[in-house]
Amino acid sequence: MDVTLMRSDFKTVPVDGGSLAVEVAESDSVPVLAIHGVTSNCRLWNWLRASAPDLSLVMPDLRGRAGSFGVRGRSSLRQHAEDMVRVLDALGLDAVAVCGMSMGGFVAVELATEWPDRVRGLVLVDGGLPMSAPAGLTPEMLPAAFAPQLGRLARSFEGVDEYLAYFTRNSPLLDPADPLLRDNLAHDLVGGRVRLSSEAVLSDAEDVFFGESSWLGLAGPVELVCAEWSVGPDTPPAYPDGALAGFRSQLPTLREPRRIAGTDHAATIMTHAGAAVVADAIRDVMAD
């Protein structure tokens, strides 16, 4: 399915330091706030839109990314959550279901614990609950740890084809011929340069790995969708089975996690198979 054929509209929402670009796709359901990951953009949800055209989605470009690249000020999980409150206010939305992918899951948790009256339930996609930092990782080492993701900022691409080839070298389970992936990456580019702030990425990553999380204060229903691997087949997942069991013993509102066989971190949402599982989790939260 060509996602460009689906109904959507971009809105501009004032926040501290500038304005967020927010894509809104209206359909049959009440709106769902969808929050993308640390180096992504609002078109991360292309596969969810294609797999679940019944869902109405509110999809911001987070500050420092794509259409919100020019927003000034320090990026943090708290700041993103405050931005999401501004988005809900601007659209006249009281309480919504929230779906967050990777770092977006951590933003969703911050939003749900600091503004619980605005969140009806959470769907966390391979993120949001505590992740163990790689052995020996320190905040000072984050630029090296994120070098593959940030390497695209140091160069200019002749077009989407070149960017697509570069991107998929480190994403072995994504299909280079997928038009939804092409559309996602095209949204990053202006004049051959990727609209992504390295400062925002590193600041947000530091929050994820080294900041304090209030996840134990989550009161509403929580669905966790997680990958079998991290990057490619047979790599350790972000959430091993033992960690999932620990989360469930401490958080009564966390339902049985949904692990998607044959997926890595990106493929949990950037494939039709992964997006279909995420859509089911969203519908289950909304049913409450």
Image (tube, helix red, strand yellow):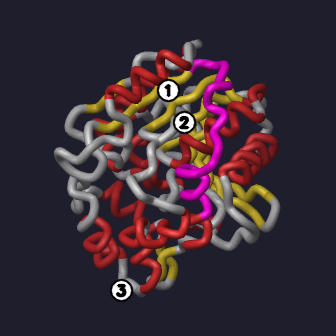
Q: x, y (%) of residue 194?
A: 48, 76
Crowding at label 2, few (<14), some or many (≥20) Cα neighbours within 10 Å?
many
Q: Nearer the viewer, residue 74 or 212?
A: 212
Of callouts 3 and 2, the N-terminal one = 2
In this orientation, which residue lies closer to the viewer: 190 or 173? 173
Residues at discs 2 and 1 in contact (Cβ within 8 Å): yes
Crowding near pointer 3: few (<14 within 10 Å), some, many (20+)?
A: few
Q: Amino acid at mark 1?
A: Ile
The quarter of the picture where residue 151 lies is bottom left
Q: Is residue 17 visible?
A: yes
Residue 155, quarter of picture? bottom left
Q: Amino acid at mark 2?
A: Cys
Residue 92: give its label.
none
Q: Which residues are magenta?
A: 203-221
Numbered mark located on residue 282 in the image: 1
Q: Residue 221: image x %, image y %?
A: 58, 18
User: Which kind of residue does numbered mark 3 sit on?
Assistant: Glu
Tell me if residue 25 can be seen: no
Q: Secondary structure at mark 1?
A: helix
Of mark 2 and mark 1, the one earlier in the sequence is 2
Q: Which residue is mark 2?
A: 99
Pointers 3 and 2 in contact (C-beta within 8 Å)? no
Q: Residue at 44% across / 84% down in the picture? A: 154
Q: Residue 270 appears at what percent x and percent y?
A: 35, 48
Read off the residue under disc 3.
158
Image position of 242 (left or right of 284): left
**Secondary structure at numbered mark 2:** strand
